[in-house]
Amino acid sequence: MPPQSEPTQVKPEPGASVPQLFTWEEIAIHSGHGSSKQDQWLVINRKVYDISNFYRKHPGGSRVISHFAGQDATEAFSAFHKNEALVKKYLSSLLIGELAPDQPCCEPNKNESLLKDFRDLYVTVKKMGLMNSNYVFFALMFLHIILLDIAAWIIIYYFGISWTPFIFSVMAFVVAQIQYGWLQHDLGHISVFQSAKWNRWFHLVVMGHLQGGPPSWWNHMHNQHHAKPNCYRKDPDLNMHPILFSLGKPLSWELGKMKKKSLPYNHQHKYFFILGPPALVPFYLQWYIFYFVVQRKQWVDLAWMVTFYIRFFLTYSFLLELKSVFALFFMLRVIESHWFVWVTQMNHIPMNIDYDKNAEWFSTQLQATCNVHQSFFNDWFSGHLNFQIEHHLFPTMPRHNFWKVTPLVKSMCTKYGIEYQSKPLLTAFADIVYSLKDSGELWLDAYTHH
């Protein structure tokens, strides 16, 4: 089939003996929207794949792969899959053709030079061994977390149940839970072990048994976030818009012009301190994760989650009255929520938030993320998420290697005039509030004057 000047809805048969040739224009209309709602194609290394009947079976989640329907998914494919050769075997049945020889290596709206340079950078990073994990690093991380977890119980056991040991026990438990969170994040990204199987098994143990959360929920949400960060309707981290908050300048202006108002967004930088850090984990996530696993019948995840609550209540019920056990658990989740929200939002909320523009992978990640200056405390406190730029560009890279790739990323930013943002920790926290204030005022202006 020669390149066509007009887009067509003809659907080729997968596995055809003669490769069918397509244009970028033809790929774009198979985006799963409009007239081709059930028709989803994407491109990986110039090969065209029909995922219409596959996306629901995709191991990484149905939505994350659908977000690239009608687009080039080459960089995303490489970023999410360590063993590309193995995964490509499963793609063969979905192959329907390839791009015509006269088609450029990327869509017309993308910078071909930037795309090629990033692909070269990715090859360089792999050759440098930066995708290889240091098992000693992760073993020490796990050891210090386990010791904190045990210390939380020992403090009450040896020093009694007065307020002072109780508070110290809570703090030790909170630190352990947060650090478990950063470790499960590493495992979810397949960045601890070379084998995906080992990462997934330990992900179940750490997130399920040691944290009380479901890995399936994390994969479903977090993979989408990495695929399309700060892209409204594709990044689930933006689901709070417009229910609770008005996020980003373009979206806030649009919301105001449409005269939509769920809450007084011009005050959102104030009520963020009530609805944000204190409430997210104990009043929403703590209960929603159970709804998620039951609705999706993730019974293995549920079983591992239950073991956490059994372990927690059995171990602490020997030391505390039942009401004190519940108080301990509630305080744990509230403090954990503060830590989690400030760290996870400082890199994204102040950045550009808009609809998906289908830009280059490099540009998309840099526009949506910023870093926090490196220090021993910042690295530990944030689980190396202060290197958010590097993490988003190379999501399967072990976190202890982020600093090594930073000079290469900065060099590419300089070459293409892309801003590489890094700031002090407290400034990053403050920018969350300032950005909410700015977008709230923009919403109010559009709401009242347009």
Image (cartoon, helix red, strand yellow):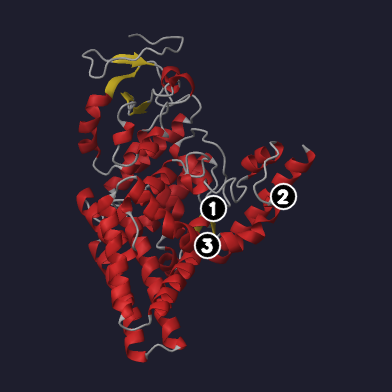
As shown in the figure, which amino acid type bears the numbered disc 3?
A: Ala
Q: Nearer the viewer, residue 40 or 419?
A: 40
Q: CA distance from mark 1 to mark 2?
A: 24 Å
Residue 170 image label: none
Q: Are marks 3 and 1 in contact (CB under 8 Å)?
A: no
Percent position (x, y) of residue 272? Answer: 61, 59
Quadrant containing the C terminus in the rendered view: top right
| Residue that badge 2 annotates | 441
Q: Residues within 10 Å of mark 3 (few under 14, many from 20)?
A: many
Q: Quadrant of residue 383?
A: bottom left
Q: Amino acid at mark 2?
A: Glu
Q: Which label is found at residue 279?
A: 3
Task: Classify 10 Å Cα crowding around label 2: few (below 14), some (14-19), many (20 and above).
Answer: many
- Comparing 20 with 197, the one in front is 197
Q: Is residue 449 left or right of residue 135?
A: right
- The tag earlier along the polypeptide, 2 or 3, is 3
